[in-house]
Image: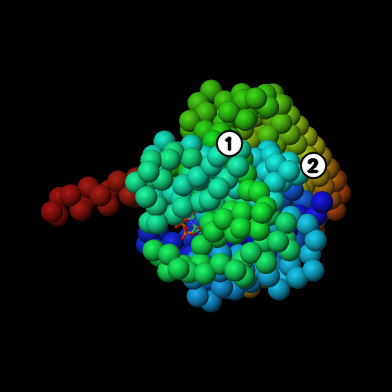
Amino acid sequence: MDIALVILAAGKGSRMNSDLPKVLHPLAGAPLLVHAMQAGASLDPKHTVIVAGHGADQVRAAALSHDATCTVVEQTEQLGTAHAADQARNKLQGFEGTVIILYGDTPFVTAETLGAMLKAQQDADVVVLGFEAADPARYGRLVTEGDTLLKIVEYKDATDEERSIRLCNSGVVACDSRLLFEMLSEIDNDNAAGEYYLTDIPERARARGLRATVVRCDESETLGINTRAELASAEAAFQARARRDAFENGVTMPAPETVYFAFDTVIGRDTVVEPHVIFAAGVTVESGATIRSFSHLEGCHVARGGVIGPYARLRPGTELSENVRVGNFVEMKNARVGTGTKVNHLSYVGDATLGERSNIGAGTITCNYDGVMKHHTHIGDDVFIGSNTMLVAPVHIGNEAMTGSGSVITSDVEPEALALARAPQIEKPGMAKKLFAMLRAKKAQQQRGS
Ligand code: UD1
Ligand code: CA
């Protein structure tokens, strides 16, 4: 059975009080919309259609950068959820299979729940995802009879008796594509909000002698984000779950509440993550590594046995082979580092390739930027880079070469050579003593004069 996802993301999200469209506010390092896309992607959909409206250009760019195969359609006027879903009609013309409708501001729906909906769809025509709300507030209410969903009533249109129902509408719907679009064209806006309600679908199905049913999930999965405070609570909920998952996957964290994960962080077994570590998007850490306190990692890969930090910053494009050490106050960007190489103190390594077993001395800098362009530094195997070496890229240091401390290296260094590029030391016997005497006399004169 083929699946198409339709993700509604046209709303303004006025309560965010933001220039940024609500669905682009980040949660765990990715826009809310990407979380919804990721949940849906678990079903391996044939089509993913995003319905954008407010900030459509930005939403389109974000959606396509996450998944270049998705389609973004524009709903120029926000006339309601049924009208929004209907914008996918052209794209899904001729599609045979099940459409699942998700909301761009509802990031936590799980793959298991969507799977349960597809299963329920085997003996129902429409499946709606519902939840028992602790505080049903203004959610749409699900009116059921046994397993059958009779109708959904919006809060604004509900009677007191209907408002007392605790089973609420999450908004997620699964329905055969052809049937869905037939029913969408029958929906009118004759209701308290004057909107085209997607929630009219179960009644439409009943009118055709078809059956709607409910799949239930935990309220935490259907959490929708409307305000910045809710965004912060969602972040806390995400982090709590990510920390639990990390423990289950065999990660040691003495202070889990101080460690922050991104939506896509992967950490191997028996890795230790010390307090106050932040994983931004795109990080994988293999087994048996140690990420020491106050390190910040983004878009990088740490292989088995690596020791990172404390106070290290790994930026996008950093690829560390096994047993690499990156010490305090070291920044790396777009750098490949070979097995066993050490960059232990106070260095910047950017746009560089480092071989195996090399040692990069304290204060080394790859001078990768000339003010206009970026250039590459290549360091071979078994190299010793002396402390405070400036490697002015593009530059190539051969295997088993050395650079003297304080060198400014502007040309390539042959294998096994020692490169020195600093002013030679000169020594003037007795000169310090004379200088001290002169300076002290001067100070004494000044003090007498004042
Ligand atoms: C909707 C449901 C309600 C449910 C609640 C769950 C309807 C009529 N009501 O209400 O039963 O309990 O969600 O959170 O469906 N959107 C568009 N275009 C539009 C209107 C909305 O893209 O014209 C998008 C929004 O961006 C949002 C989603 O659809 O992602 C839901 O819209 P919203 O206005 O928040 O619906 P609710 O009133 O919360
Ligand atoms: Ca809402």
Q: Residue at x 48, y 69 (%)?
A: 189
Residue 374: percent from left, percent from top: 68, 66
Name the residue that disc number 1 marks.
Answer: 146
Q: Is disc 1 placed on a helix, strand or loop?
A: loop
Residue 449: percent from left, percent from top: 14, 54
Q: Is residue 34 above or below residue 300?
A: below
| Marks 1 and 2 close (CB-CB < 8 Å) | no
Mark closest to the chain's N terminus, 1 or 2? 1
Residue 162: percent from left, percent from top: 41, 45
**How many marks overall?**
2
Nearest to viewer (mark 1 / mark 2): 1
Residue 425 in sight from this viewpoint:
no
Ligand 1 closer than 8 Å to the CB at disc 1? no
Q: Residue at x 57, y 45 (%)?
A: 149
Name the residue that disc number 2 marks.
Answer: 338
Q: Quadrant of residue 207?
A: bottom right
Q: Is 439 situated left or right of 392 in this image?
A: left
Q: Residue at x 38, y 56 (%)?
A: 156
Q: Is 359 situated left or right of 131 in this image?
A: right
Q: Residue furthest bottom?
A: 76
